[in-house]
Amino acid sequence: MHGAMQASPLAARTAFTGSKVTARTTRVAGARKAFQARAEAKNLTFDMKSRIKIQRGIDKLADAVAVTLGPRGRNVVLSERVGIPQVINDGVTIARAIELPDPVENAGAQLIKEVAGRTNDSAGDGTTTASVLAREMIRLGLQSVTAGANPISINKGITKTRAFCTEKLEELAKPINGSVDIKAVASISAGNNDEIGEMIADAIEKVGADGVLSIENGSGLETVVEVEEGMEIDRGYLSAQFVNNNEKLSVEFEGCRILVTDAKIDQVKDLVPILEQVSQNGGDPLLIIAEDITGEALATLVVNKIRGVLNVAAIKAPGFGERRKSLLQDIAIVTGSTFLASDLGLGPSAATMDCLGYARKVTITNNTTTIIADAASRDEIDIRVAQLKQELAETDSIYDTQKISERIAKLSGGVAVIKVGAATETELEDRKLRIEDAKNATFAAIEEGIVPGGGAAFVHLSLMIDEFKETLTDPEERLGADIVQKALLAPCRIIANNAGVEGDVVVEKVMKMAWEMGYNAMSGEYVNMLEAGVIDPKKVTRSGLMNSCSIAGMVLTTQAVITEIPKAPVRMGAPMADPNDPGMGNFSL
C-alpha cells in the first residue's frame, strides 16, 4: 500500500515552478522572434545596364519638356486621376508630374526633375533649358565613361568649365534698362505673349523693383492688374462704433496721428496723458495700434468717439510672437513714429506727441487697415529694406521667404495683384503658369541683368570654352570641358527644331556671329537679340547651367542603382473568402 514513493509538497512545487519558467521562456523567445525587423529586399542594377536604364528615363522626361521650348514650342496635356486634364507649357510642372513604371528609369527621371526644381526655386524660370542641358551632358558623359574614361576626372573638368562660363556670364551681362526691357523679358518668358509682358511691366512700374506681384484667380474673362497703395495690415477696427463712413462701414482718417505699441491696454490711465496732448494740439485723428485694448480703456475710447470729443480708432497689432514685433517696427518706420516696446520699459503712458507717427490717409474696415504715409525718412526705410533683404538671402524656408518679401514690398513700394481671367479652367491654369514664369524672370533680370535669349548666349559661351580648354593639363578634364561645350548648343538647336527649321544649321550660323546676335525663332531671322527684345535674365541662364552641370557630374560617377522591387497591384473588388467554404480548405463545424 505504501510501496509507491509519494512526492513531497516542496518537490511538487519546485517541479511546477520549473515547468512554468520553461513555458514563459518559450513564449518570450517566440515573441522576440515574431518582432524581428527585416528590411525589404531591393533590386540592384550595376555598370552598363544601370547607365542605359538611367539614360532611358532621362530621355523620356527631357523629351516631354523639350517640346515646350522656344516661342513656337508646343503644349503638353497633363491628365491627373482627379479633375480635368491641364494643357500646360511650363517645364517644371510637366517634370513634376512624370513617374515612370520602371524603377531604374524613374530614378533617372527624378534626377532631371531635381534639376528643374532647383532651377525653379533659385530663378523661377528656365527649367526646360536646364533639363535639356542636363540630358545632353549626361548623354555625352556616359558615352565617354563607357569608352573607358575616368568619370571623376570628367566631373572635375565639368566643374571647372562651369566656373569659367559663370564668370563669362558675369562679365557679359548687361543691366536691365527701363520698362522696355522688362516687357521684353516678361513676354519671352510667357511664350512670346506681349499682353502679359505689358501687364508685368505696368505692374512693376507702379510698385517698383522691391514690390510684390501677387497672382490670383479673377472672376471675369479679362486679366487685370490692381495696385494696393500703402501698407496693408490684416487687422480691422476693435469696435464698430469707430466707423465714420456708414455707407462703406469703414473708418477713414486724413492727416492721422499713429501710436504704435506692443503693450496690452486695459487701464484708461495709460491713455489719458496722450489723449489730452492730442486734443490740445489741434485734435488730429488718432489711430492706436496695440497688442489689445480691452475693458475700461476701450469703453472710454468708444464713448469719447460717439460724443465727438475724440476722433480716434484702435486696432490689434498684426502677426504673432516675434513676427508681431517686427511688423510693428515696420509700421513705426513707415509712419515715422517711435515703437513703444514693453521690453524696453516703454508703454502708452509714456507717450508724447514726438512719439506719434503721421499718415496722410488711413482706411480701416472690419478686417483690414491701409496706411498711406509719406512723412517718414526714406533713409530709415532703405536701411530696413536692406536688412530684410539680408534675412531673405539667408533663409531657406518658403514661408519665411514669402512673409519677408511681403514686408519688403509694404515698406518700399506696394503690392500689385494680377487677377487672371479666362474662358475655361484649362486656359486659366495655363495663363497663371505663364504669368508666374514671366514674373519670376522679370525679377531675376532686375536682380542680375540680361543676356541674349533664344539659346544664343549658350552658343557663344560654347565657343569661348576653346580658349579655356588650353589651360587644362589633364586630357580627361579636357574631355569634361568638351562635354559642356557640346551640350551648350542643345537649347538653340531644340528651339530651332520646334520652329520647324534645321537646328544644326541655325547653330552653325549663330556660332559665326557676335555675342549679341542670334536666331529669332518667332520671325525666322538672325538679329541683334538685345535690340529685338529676345533676351533672357542672366540669373536664369546661370542657374540652369550650374544645376545641369552639378547633376551631370553626379550621374557620371554612379556605378550602381538600388531600387525598390515593384509590388504586384492588389486587384480591387476581389470576393472575400468564406471561412465555412469546404473548397477553401478551412471548413469548420
Image: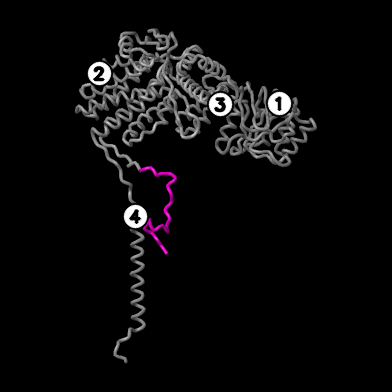
- Residue 181 drawn above or below residue 388: above
Left/right placement of residue 222 relative to residue 304 reads: left
What is the C-alpha distance between the residues marked 3 and 2?
49 Å
Q: Which residue is mark 4?
A: 36
**Whole-percent x and y of residue 384?**
53, 26
Examine the structure image and report whether residue 578 is included in the region drawn in magenta.
yes
- Residue 216 disc label: 3
Q: Which residue is mark 1?
A: 252
Q: Are marks 3 and 4 in contact (CB under 8 Å)?
A: no
The magenta-colored residue range is: 568-589
Pick whichever, 18 or 442, lies toward us.
18
**Whole-percent x and y of residue 224?**
58, 19
Which mark sits nearer the N-terminus, 1 or 2?
Answer: 1
Pick whichever, 436 or 273, lies toward us.
436
**Whole-percent x and y of residue 145?**
23, 28
Which mark sits nearer the N-terminus, 1 or 3?
Answer: 3
**Whole-percent x and y of residue 13?**
36, 78
Three-letter code, disc 4: Gln
Q: Which residue is mark 2?
A: 469
Circle 2: element type: helix
- Residue 30 drawn above or below residue 397: below
Which mark sits nearer the N-terminus, 3 or 4?
Answer: 4
- Residue at 64 percent across and 26 percent down: it is 371
